Amino acid sequence: MSSPLSPPLKKDPQKRTQSPLRPPEARSRAALGLTAAAAEGRFALQVCDDCGTVQYPPRDVCGSCLSAALEWQDISPAGTLLAETRIRTSINLYFRERTPWRMGSVQLEAGPVVLCHVHGDCERGGAVTLLNRLDASGQGVLLAVPKDRTSNMEDDPQMRALSAAPKHRRILITDLRNPNTPALVSALLEAGASTIFVGEAESWRPHANRDLISGLEKVSVLPLDVTDTSSVQRLAGEIGGKTDILVNNARFLRPGGVLARGDTAFAREEMETNYLGLMRLAQAFGPGMCTRTNDGVNSAVAWVNVLSVFALSNTPDFGCFSASNAAAYSLCQSLRGEFRASGLRVMTVFTGPDDDDWTQPVPPPKVTSKALAKAIVSGLQQGLEDVWCGDVAMEIRERWRRDPKVLERELTQGGEGA
Amino acid sequence: MGKRQSYEGVAVTAPVSVPYQRYSIETAHWWIASALRGSLQAAGLRPADIDGFSVASFTLFPDTAVGLTQHLGLCPRWLENIPMGGASGVIALRRAARAVQAGDADIVACVAGDTNHIDSFRNLLSSFSRFAQDASYPYGFGGPNANFALLTDRYMQEYGATREDFGMICVAQRDNALRNPNALMKKPLTLEQYLEARPIADPIALFDCVMPCAGSECFLVMSVEEAQRRNLPYAVIGGTIERHNAHAQDPVQLRGGWTLDVEELYAMADCTPDDIDLLQTYDDYPVISMMQIEDLGFCDKGGAPDFVRNRDLTITGDFPHNTSGGQLSAGQAGAAGGFIGLVEALRQVLGSAGGTQVADATTAMVSGFGMINYDRGICTSAAIVKTGSPA
């Protein structure tokens, strides 16, 4: 069993904040397939289409038959720990600060032997399961964990470093008025968050969510209007140094494409909130979070942005809203690159229609607040980059992967009599 | 498989080691040139007399053997660059020998050398191989220490080896190194000190690891007639083998490519393990020396722990092993680590080993092991060299 993670001590302001450090980032193009699978929490390896051999390390051609037809496929993560070591000295600074570092070799039932990180509860010769997780360099790495759960296993330091777990962390949710916020607050509290800040725009207007949230222990409601630069900067000045996870769920949502609207008024509002709001938050909170990614138990760890899955391909019923989400998604990709050197993760959460007032005429299935909250918490715990929440989002993902043009044609099918 | 041709008529001469340094401000070019100059002087040759040139080095970048020809003013008609690390010495030897036999070159200089700047080792590791970059370094960046820790861990489980057994090899080599004035390690090492040393990557501790350093090694290959005409003492080659990526299906490397070819090696050299007067293994970690002792036929697989318990591995013992102190006690000078055993073996059979000379040594075996591409060493090589005409 792992020892439970202790809550962090109060930060000593006289001590220098440790600089962000990262494990080696360099990879071949082939190896990035592992990273792409880790971004979604999948364990996948290359399999030869011609002879079926499972490959590892990643290759350009099959090590058995020289075929170039290698496909990344989900395979069984079951294996046996063959040998292990605790590295006590490393010339890489990230590992040097974290020694002893346990690693080992695992014989996979699927065939290959892999070198991997080894969870503290694994026994030599014992059955293990391999997880494929993103490390602080944003690269997919393999971690062997015991086949059967052990107590506090997520608190193992190596496993925690491969996650963005909310436990003992301080979290800012940017939009109190979002209908999904109360469920998200309770899911994060349940996951062990130490403090939750909830931003509220136009606080003079009463809102049911405030009544649900404001009295909760560990939760504080603070003024935040993401369309107002000074409001964002004011809040960053106040809590920017203690924001470990930022969940941006602020959104402005109205139905309609270009012709259904007579002017650009709603489109402006959508861009102000969904796109520029994200940018304002990133400019105000990002730099501070980036300096605190190596700050112990409650280091800054993740930026979460909730997006419509129609960011990938436009649905004209919500054509302008989809466009603002496409812009926000693109900005999230930029932020991934800009945050990379610090190790701060960007998790994009793609959802289908939920039970917002403005999506009332949209037929089910709809994403419930609970399901969205659960997806966000589990995504953080697994350290994911891309989370697909609900049946609609997962279906759009599959169709988009199969053929983006076909999906576009289907989503833009002409209405009756048009 | 066809029978290989013998190495008859080939002479190996002028073995030279340039004294190693822990850190050097000189370049690999400087170290290689120093060793080459040493061998040429020992043989009474000028650079223009060389028409074959073979180079092994990790730190020549951006140069290779090609750039060195112009840098050193050589005009060879046979040029070789050997990127096989710890296996490079024997491989340079066998390639050069064939070139001489075929008449592609008359006199081949085989050189290995590397420098060691403060940050060299880290830079070298960072760009060592694609599989290591993708699938080994992200896991703790322990370098070869971590790889060999896993191998040692598995070997101990499989064959019941103890840390004391590995210590026997290290302690004996230190004893040998004390007779080699150029060895970097100057202090005696006891088994207690070995066992109590700082852990590096369990079960590997400080004295299981080599010390990276700068250094270079060189020898010359020519025809026996050429050596005799120049009145040079020379060694002859009984046999050589090399093998790459053998036993790829073994989950952890507990044997090397030698097992596939060792019988042919003894057959070519017309001898048995009993005829070997001294053995130079590639000793980046003691477990690898044990693997070689087994795979080269000195005992059964898994028998090396018992073997080292019952034999005396020092220069005056009944199984002289790594007589110059090996890399563990003399230092690991990059690719020259693939030459240190061969150059010392040549001195031994020529009777010119000085303080480390094994009495009446006429037949020596040298083994090479190189290049941890991912989880194991890929290249293996071995040679038997014998006294041709002593000094």
Image: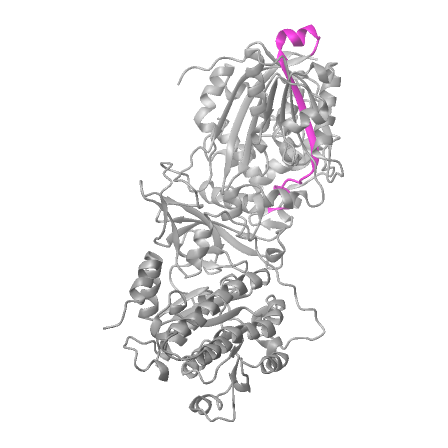
Q: Nearer the viewer, residue A280 or B288?
A: A280
> Is A81 situated left or right of A12 in this image?
left
In the picture, the quarter occupied by the N terminus of chain B is top left
Range of residues picked out in magenta: B205-232
Q: Which residue is drawn at 41% across and 39% down?
A: B250
The reply, left or right, for residue B218 in relation to residue A407 is right
Which quadrant of the rendered structure holds the C terminus of chain B? Answer: top right
Q: In this view, does A197 lie above or below B182?
A: below
In the figure, A20 relative to B153: above or below? below
Residue A115, x across and y down, in percent:
47, 49
User: Count the marks: how many?
Assistant: 0
The reply to whether residue A168 is in sight is: no
- Residue at x 64%, y 40% (from the top left corner): B210
Colour logic: one colour
What residue is shown at x 47% (from left), y 71% (from top)? A305
Q: Is residue A90 above or below residue A321?
A: above
Q: Where is residue A76 in the image (x, y as percent from the top left)?
A: 34, 54
Q: In which quarter of the image is residue A390?
A: bottom left
In the rendered image, the residue lying farthest to the left is: A417
User: In the image, residue A51 lies at what x, y percent?
Assistant: 31, 40
In the depicted structure, whether residue B90 falls above or below residue A300: above
Q: Nearer the viewer, residue A301 or A339?
A: A339
Answer whether residue B93 is visible to the viewer in this image: yes
- Tell me: B92 left or right of B118: left
Say if the magenta span includes residue A3: no
Seen from the viewer's position, the closer of residues A257 and A344 is A257
Question: What x and y, as percent, mark residue A329?
Answer: 46, 67
Depth check, front residue: B66 or A317? A317
Q: Does the magenta stretch include residue B224?
A: yes
